[in-house]
Image: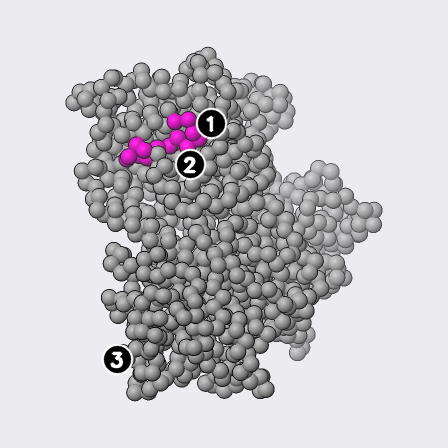
């Protein structure tokens, strides 16, 4: 925490004469021609004696006689003696011109201008009194406010913010606009003069503590709008500081001959000024937040509380990096218990603005978990407007993550669709609409309260089958589809007795009563729909959607009832209808539904098995005979097949493939005909893509069913050899189709190949199945290369390069998401081959090098692959990581040549990737010791691999790679750094060690990183000097905090090692052992992962001076909430109190009204104002009793 600087309790007028500005407007003075006031140059801080107050350049505080001033006030548009209040109230002048006139008067005589501004706030409060120059010079702050209070006329109770009429309604917006424009126009110099803002903030803080409602209301609104304007200034400063940093780094990284030292100095000066400005803004915001907000957000007046909550929502949304954390969110959470509806409404609308932005969801997780129940309860708020907004907020929460809301939470919203208040019902309907598979969830939500209605299947059946009576309206097609879907969901819930996916915590043991109810329901379902289902299928046989749902009903039948109830004729009718549907439809969903229905009915435990099996065999016989006949005509030589023949072959093949998915069709020998079809496609190259896709899928099923048959029963050697031959031939066919011109065909071939290679890998012998060893298939280097090429060509592509729609227009957002999902599945299939060592681990280098470029799309998959490969073989994984960096380096050389610019974005990107790779090794250096050592060994060898053809006086061609390798130096143990340094010297000549030219800087940087004893060994790429030492701000040191000690302890623990320095070079043959294949471990949450090493960033923006300790501080990893950090990012060391990444103690804080310091990342506060007013309002008077027991974080 930082100490708060003192705010003067009176309105100071400084001794020095007025400052004359060289320009008419307050614009940014980058080159420093117009020095800012208040920095110890033109102004001095401190309170002056009464006789000194108001002395100005024109003498004795006399008003100036400028062109736009008369008697100390504006002369505008011919109106003399016009006060600011009157101008703003009239609302006829452009606000910017009003503010510009005031700024001009401030530049001429700031005392008189400030007196105008003070009276403006007094008059806006409805006070008739006027602060005179005499009062301004001689009276203290509290005395002036007391004087104004005495002159205040409170008889009417009205003041500008509460008065009725169109003029006064507009006044509030004009008042707020004036404050915003004032700060915006003064943001480059005047607000930093330590006079104007100090005076205004002191005035508003004092007024906000007044017992006069008008003063308190008006000053709170002004202070909150002033704070919002300052937040906007702070955000702009942050952007400017980032830009300045990038410009500085770009200039500094240039070759020495190309650097502009004057520009560097100018950028350094600009950076310093921006930092000082940011510190000033932080102090102002701290003063307003602690002096006004923390007292007035619980004011006795609801309008004042609402103002505070509305504005804090704006701050969190506008500048989320600084304000969107639990320290500020808790105020909104607490105030959701406010007794007044308008305040609760402001809380909800503020939160909606945050939850709407999905990028902010990660920062809202803890708040959501703490206050979700309160938000859910607010859907039943007595104020309808509050209830509507609460439902809308829950809809946004649902869209951000479906796992946040429990089934009970959702049920509390469902029934509101029947609310008598239409806006509530509409909002609840929208919430229900956003749920996936809403029919199943709707049924589950009403299962306990409307069981009889939901189980009224006779009524549903009659609505679908019977004709409507006279005067009744028939169901529309959409209503029929909805009714069938609801009917299916109720039958599923009754038969399975568990909620839909995501609603339950797992299958539970049913009670005896529940089991009896389940059996009774299944009996009722079977007796009814065994008779009705054939009729329903006959009626809706041409509607694919309805038929697909209806065909799922037999899965929930008690099949014994077909025999005991003598319903065999209805079974025959059902089989006939299924057969007709198969003949009519080619839609994959319908055909698979038919296949699953046959599978459900073909149960050997029931007497109906023979009847169903005969029907199934007859159907497959007809399909197989038809397919062979059509195929023979289709593949006749010398004849070009027409479209009708191709359609017949495709439709028959789709039917066979759908049935082969769930049924063993081995006796029909489908491999031969499919192989012939696929081989012809390879030879001729004109086979329709859909035929190839389904032929590949069908052949895949043939292979899998044969393997299942061999595995489950004793098999002969001939069976094994036949399967082995078919499998290898099929893999060759798939490999051929990887080069097909059609992308869909290539994707199908790739997916099947990955499945086949995974199934027939060495894993097939696990579980005592050694007899399957002849089937083990290891892909050769050619196949591995083609699989990798497919991934690089079809997965790592830009979104806009993916498939477009048929008419050439870009796909809609849903299609893009579906395409990305498909590409992620393709990448996951290949990464699984890497993880299970089906393909060589070094093939992962081409995957790992895409980590940064495609982080948003595939970062989680690539990172998990790194983790699993490291668990299998740490050393080989490290060698793969360095290989990926070498590949990127070589690609850059091929594109730019050896004389590339090391400040280029390409080289910087490789360095950043190396930094990310280094982070994945974690904190335990002993576990990764051998792997890191081997990584450095390979990197050094690569750097010196290509000697310079111009001789030893020139650096090796790959020497710049040492810059990249230095990112891993901090992961070496101290004694291993010496060993690596000795190994490096083997490649160096004596002349190399003496070189100091720019081209040798990578070697100098890498050597220094190995020689350094601290934890931060990564050196500056260009200068060869540690960036930390040259970028520490020369600011007043702050008292060390617990957080700072943790950081220091971590740093020391990573550097102070007691091992002997005489360690030998780690040779793989002597010390490294590759572990055997292990079971793939389960994922753990981020909470269980090792805490990250804390290291200050190298840039000047985020390096803080740290006290050097000469002893090792014990580590306390529990001091930081590591689960709140990004997994692969090193945390920036910030001194932000009570942030979401802060101390655990803050997360367990009870409901008190202490507050924090505003600290804009990544700077630190230089000073802070301390005068805070006591709060005389009891919070219990405005909040429900329940809130006083609420614990926040």
User: Is 1023 colored magenta in this rendering?
Assistant: yes
Q: Which residue is mark 3?
A: 67
- Picture coordinates of residue 564, whole percent (x, y): 80, 47
The residue shown at (56%, 33%) is 1115
Q: For marks 2 and 3, give the CA distance.
A: 63 Å
Report the front residue among 658 and 55: 55
Q: Which residue is mark 2?
A: 916
Q: For marks 1 and 2, give the CA distance.
A: 21 Å
Secondary structure of the residue carrying tag 2 is helix
Q: Is residue 818 above or below residue 1071?
A: below
N-terminal of the pair, mark 1 or mark 3, is 3
Q: From which residue to which does the magenta span run?
A: 1012-1025
Q: Is residue 877 above or below residue 81?
A: above
Report the front residue among 1119 and 452: 1119
Report the front residue among 993 and 643: 993
Q: Are marks 1 and 3 in contact (CB under 8 Å)?
A: no
Q: Residues within 10 Å of mark 1 (few under 14, many from 20)?
A: some
Q: Are marks 1 and 2 in contact (CB under 8 Å)?
A: no
Q: Residues within 10 Å of mark 2 (few under 14, many from 20)?
A: some
Residue 1182: quadrant of the picture? bottom right
The residue shown at (39%, 68%) is 52
Q: Which mark is residue 1055?
A: 1
- Picture coordinates of residue 362, whole percent (x, y): 52, 50
N-terminal of the pair, mark 1 or mark 2, is 2
- Is 162 on the left or on the right of 180, as rendered? right
Q: Which mark is residue 1098?
A: none
């Amino acid at each position: 925490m930082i100490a708060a600087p003192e705010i003067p309790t009176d309105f100071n007028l400084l001794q020095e004469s007025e400052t004359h500005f060289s320009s008419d407007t307050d614009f940014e003075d980058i080159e420093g021609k117009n020095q800012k006031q208040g920095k110890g140059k033109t102004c001095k801080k401190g309170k002056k004696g009464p006789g000194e107050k108001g002395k100005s350049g024109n003498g004795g505080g006399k008003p100036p006689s400028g062109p736009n001033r008369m008697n100390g006030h504006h002369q505008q548009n011919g109106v003399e003696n016009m006060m600011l209040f009157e101008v703003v109230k009239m609302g006829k002048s452009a606000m910017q011109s009003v503010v510009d006139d005031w700024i001009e008067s401030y530049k001429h005589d700031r005392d008189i201008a400030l007196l105008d501004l003070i009276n403006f706030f007094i008059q806006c409060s409805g006070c008739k009194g006027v602060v005179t120059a005499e009062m301004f010079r001689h009276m203290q702050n509290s005395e002036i406010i007391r004087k104004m209070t005495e002159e205040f006329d409170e008889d009417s109770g009205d003041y500008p913010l509460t008065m009725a009429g169109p003029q006064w309604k507009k006044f509030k917006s004009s008042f707020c606009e004036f404050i915003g424009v004032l700060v915006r126009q003064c943001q480059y110099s005047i607000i930093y003069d330590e006079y104007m803002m100090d005076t205004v903030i002191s005035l508003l803080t004092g007024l906000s503590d007044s017992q006069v409602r008008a003063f308190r209301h008006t000053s709170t609104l002004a202070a909150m709008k002033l704070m919002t304007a300052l937040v906007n200034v702070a955000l702009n400063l942050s952007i400017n500081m980032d830009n300045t940093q990038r410009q500085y780094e770009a200039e500094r990284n240039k070759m020495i001959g190309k650097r502009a030292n004057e520009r560097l100095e100018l950028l350094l000066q600009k950076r310093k000024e921006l930092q000082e400005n940011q510190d000033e803004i932080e102090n102002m915001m701290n003063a307003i937040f602690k002096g006004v907000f923390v007292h007035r957000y619980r004011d006795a007046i609801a309008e004042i509380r609402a103002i505070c909550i509305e504005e804090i929502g704006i701050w969190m949304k506008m500048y989320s990096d600084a304000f969107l954390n639990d320290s500020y969110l808790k105020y909104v959470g607490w105030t959701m218990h406010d007794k007044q509806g308008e305040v609760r409404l402001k809380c909800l609308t503020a939160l909606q603005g945050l939850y709407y932005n999905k990028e902010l969801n990660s920062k809202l997780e803890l708040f959501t978990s703490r206050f979700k129940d309160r938000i859910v309860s607010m859907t039943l708020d007595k104020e309808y407007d509050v209830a509507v907004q609460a439902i809308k907020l829950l809809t946004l929460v649902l869209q951000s993550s479906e796992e946040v809301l429990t089934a009970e939470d959702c049920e509390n919203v469902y029934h509101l669709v029947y609310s008598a208040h239409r806006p509530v019902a509409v909002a609840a309907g929208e919430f229900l609409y956003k749920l996936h598979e809403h029919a199943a969830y709707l049924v589950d939500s009403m299962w306990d309260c409307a069981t009889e209605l939901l189980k009224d299947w006779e009524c549903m059946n009659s609505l679908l089958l019977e004709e409507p009576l006279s005067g009744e309206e028939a169901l529309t097609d959409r209503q029929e589809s909805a009714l069938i879907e609801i009917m299916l969901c109720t039958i599923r819930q009754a038969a399975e007795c568990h909620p839909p996916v995501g609603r339950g915590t797992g299958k539970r043991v049913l009670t005896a009563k529940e089991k009896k109810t389940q059996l009774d329901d299944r009996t009722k379902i079977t007796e009814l729909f065994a008779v009705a289902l054939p009729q329903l299928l006959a009626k809706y046989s041409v509607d694919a959607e309805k038929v697909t749902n209806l065909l799922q009903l037999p899965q929930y039948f008690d099949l014994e009832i077909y025999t005991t109830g003598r319903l065999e004729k209805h079974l025959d009718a059902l089989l006939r209808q299924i057969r007709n549907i198969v003949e009519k439809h080619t839609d994959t969903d319908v055909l698979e539904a038919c296949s699953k229905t046959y599978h459900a009915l073909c149960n050997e435990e029931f007497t109906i098995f023979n009847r169903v099996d005969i029907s199934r065999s007859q159907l497959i016989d007809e399909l197989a005979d038809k397919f062979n006949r059509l195929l023979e005509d289709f593949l006749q030589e010398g004849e070009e097949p027409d479209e009708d023949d191709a359609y017949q072959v495709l439709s028959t093949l789709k039917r066979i493939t759908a049935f082969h998915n769930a049924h063993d069709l081995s006796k029909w020998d489908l491999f031969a005909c499919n192989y012939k079809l696929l081989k012809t496609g390879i030879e001729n190259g004109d086979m329709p893509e859909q035929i190839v896709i389904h032929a590949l899928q069908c052949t895949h099923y043939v292979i899998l069913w044969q393997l299942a048959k061999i595995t489950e029963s004793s098999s002969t050697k001939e069976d094994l050899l036949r399967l082995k031959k078919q499998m290898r031939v099929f893999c060759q066919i798939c490999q051929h189709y990887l080069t097909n011109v059609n992308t869909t065909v290539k994707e199908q071939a790739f997916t099947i190949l990955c499945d086949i290679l995974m199934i027939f890998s060495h894993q097939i012998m696990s579980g005592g199945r050694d007899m399957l060893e002849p089937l083990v298939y290891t892909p050769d280097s050619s196949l591995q290369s083609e699989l990798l090429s497919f991934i690089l060509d079809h997965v790592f592509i830009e979104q806009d390069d993916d498939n477009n729609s048929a008419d050439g227009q870009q796909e809609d957002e849903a299609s893009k998401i579906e395409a990305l999902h498909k590409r992620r599945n393709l990448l996951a299939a290949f990464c699984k081959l890497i993880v299970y060592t089906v393909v060589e681990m070094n093939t992962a280098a081409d995957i790992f090098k895409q980590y940064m470029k495609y982080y948003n799309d595939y970062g989680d998959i690539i990172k998990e692959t790194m983790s699993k490969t490291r668990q299998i073989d740490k050393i080989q994984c490290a060698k793969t990581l360095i290989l990926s960096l070498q590949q990127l380096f070589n690609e850059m050389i091929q594109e730019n040549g050896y004389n590339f610019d090391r400040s280029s974005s390409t080289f910087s990107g490789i360095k950043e990737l190396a930094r990310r790779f280094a982070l994945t090794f974690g904190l335990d250096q002993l576990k990764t010791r051998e792997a890191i050592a081997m990584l450095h060994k390979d990197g050094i060898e690569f750097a010196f691999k290509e000697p310079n053809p111009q001789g030893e006086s020139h650096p090796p061609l790959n020497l710049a790679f040492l810059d990249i390798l230095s990112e891993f130096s901090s992961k070496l143990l101290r004694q291993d750094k010496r060993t690596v340094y000795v190994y490096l010297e083997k490649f160096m000549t004596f002349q190399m060690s003496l070189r100091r030219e720019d081209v040798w800087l990578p070697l100098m940087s890498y050597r220094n990183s190995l020689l350094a004893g601290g934890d931060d060994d990564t050196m500056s790429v260009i200068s060869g000097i540690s960036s930390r030492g040259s970028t520490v701000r020369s600011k007043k040191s702050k008292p060390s905090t617990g957080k700072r000690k943790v950081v220091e302890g971590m740093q020391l623990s990573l550097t102070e090692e007691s091992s002997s320095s005489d360690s030998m070079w780690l040779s793989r043959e002597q010390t490294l052992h590759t572990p055997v294949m292990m079971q793939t471990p389960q994922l753990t949450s981020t909470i269980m992962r090792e805490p990250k090493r804390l290291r200050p960033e190298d840039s000047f923006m985020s390096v803080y001076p740290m006290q050097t300790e000469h002893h090792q501080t014990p580590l306390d990893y529990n001091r930081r909430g590591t689960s709140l950090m990004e997994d692969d990012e090193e945390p920036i060391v910030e001194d932000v109190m009570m942030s979401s990444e802060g101390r655990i103690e803050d997360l367990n804080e009870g409901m008190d009204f202490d507050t924090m310091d505003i600290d804009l990342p990544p700077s630190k506060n230089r000073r802070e104002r301390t005068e805070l007013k006591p709060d005389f309002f009891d919070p219990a008077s405005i909040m429900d009793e329940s809130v006083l027991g609420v614990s926040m974080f």
